[in-house]
Image (cartoon, helix red, strand yellow):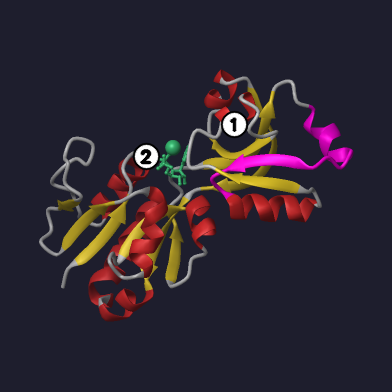
């Protein structure tokens, strides 16, 4: 019985390492230097697959991975179908925010009922947010570098993830509204949990204990 864990490179991988260690799992290669997409671990029965952050829920949903780690931002856009989400790992923490150019008066625009153009990777979260405020928006789907959009006139605002605010500042943008707090969650394929419970449950318990420390 092999357990496959889907992770994305970068902060999620780095911040998941201590949790894996708590479950007795150590990757034998570093995804930053290895070109392999399937990484062996110290345990014969556990392997890691390296996928794009937005693809983690899809691999787990279809059972190509048994377990994965994905941000709430990504899970909300995916919808979470077929996924059991037992645990908030409290890692890769940031906030989803509305941001505009420093010289843009967002409050007045909203108050005057202006129709706003909003560029984002998070179309679903943005639609829900502005609908709940009763603000009319035209959403423009982007796949990255959202900060550029208001600077070149593609949009009035962006919805993006912010942690330090350094990227916004470097691009003469300001955050004007918080949409939600984001952290990463463990996701588990529902069939895997039933069929491979004897291997998966101890891992979930070890992760939960490590998170609560
Ligand atoms: P990608 O560039 O493929 O979107 P990232 O490593 O930037 O991958 O983001 C992966 C996940 O990490 C996001 O889905 C989100 O949950 C989280 N994240 C993104 N930006 C930040 C940030 N600035 N601080 C903390 N966590 C973040
Ligand atoms: Mg990024």
Left or right, 198 with reference to 185 = left
Label 2: element kind: helix
The residue carrying pointer 1 sits among few (fewer than 14), some (14 to 19) or many (20 or more) residues within 10 Å by Cα, namely many
Q: Is residue 79 above or below residue 71?
A: below
Q: Is residue 193 above or below residue 172?
A: below
- The residue nearer to you, when weighing 125 against 178, is 125
Q: Determine the image quadrant of residue 201.
A: bottom left
The residue carrying pointer 2 sits among few (fewer than 14), some (14 to 19) or many (20 or more) residues within 10 Å by Cα, namely few
- The residue nearer to you, when weighing 194 against 141, is 141
Label 1: element kind: helix
Gap between marks 1 and 2, in whole Å? Answer: 25 Å
Residue at the spot 53% in from the left edge and 23% down from the top edge: 166
Name the residue carrying label 1.
149
Q: Cβ of disc 2 within 8 Å of ligand 1?
A: yes
Which mark lies nearer to you, 1 or 2? 1
Q: Determine the image quadrant of residue 202.
A: bottom left
Residue at the spot 89% in from the left edge and 38% down from the top edge: 112
* Residues in magenta, as a range: 105-122
Name the residue carrying label 2.
11
Residue 139, image x, y percentages: 65, 47
Left or right, 176 with reference to 72 = right
Q: Is residue 122 above or below residue 106?
A: below
Determine if the magenta segment contains residue 56.
no
One can see residue 213 in this view: no
Residue 113, image x, y percentages: 86, 42
Q: Cβ of disc 1 within 8 Å of ligand 2?
A: no
């Amino acid at each position: 019985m092999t357990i496959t864990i889907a992770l994305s490179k970068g902060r999620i991988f780095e911040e998941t390492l201590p949790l894996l260690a708590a479950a007795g799992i150590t990757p034998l290669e570093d995804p930053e230097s290895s070109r392999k997409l399937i990484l062996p671990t110290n345990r014969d029965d556990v392997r890691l697959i390296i996928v794009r952050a937005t693809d983690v829920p899809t691999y787990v949903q279809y059972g190509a991975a048994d377990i994965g780690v994905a941000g709430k931002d990504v899970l909300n856009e995916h919808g979470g179908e077929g996924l059991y989400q037992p645990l908030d790992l409290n890692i890769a923490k940031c906030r989803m925010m509305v941001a505009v150019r420093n010289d843009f008066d967002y409050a007045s625009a909203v108050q005057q009922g202006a129709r706003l153009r909003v560029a984002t990777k998070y179309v679903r979260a943005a639609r829900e947010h502005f609908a709940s405020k009763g603000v009319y928006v035209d959403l423009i789907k982007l796949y990255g570098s959202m900060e550029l959009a208001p600077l070149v006139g593609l949009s009035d605002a962006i919805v993006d993830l912010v942690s330090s605010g350094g990227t916004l500042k470097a691009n003469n943008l300001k955050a004007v509204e918080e949409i939600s707090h984001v952290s990463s969650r463990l996701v588990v394929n529902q069939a895997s949990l039933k069929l491979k419970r004897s291997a998966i449950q101890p891992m979930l318990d070890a992760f939960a204990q490590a998170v609560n420390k």
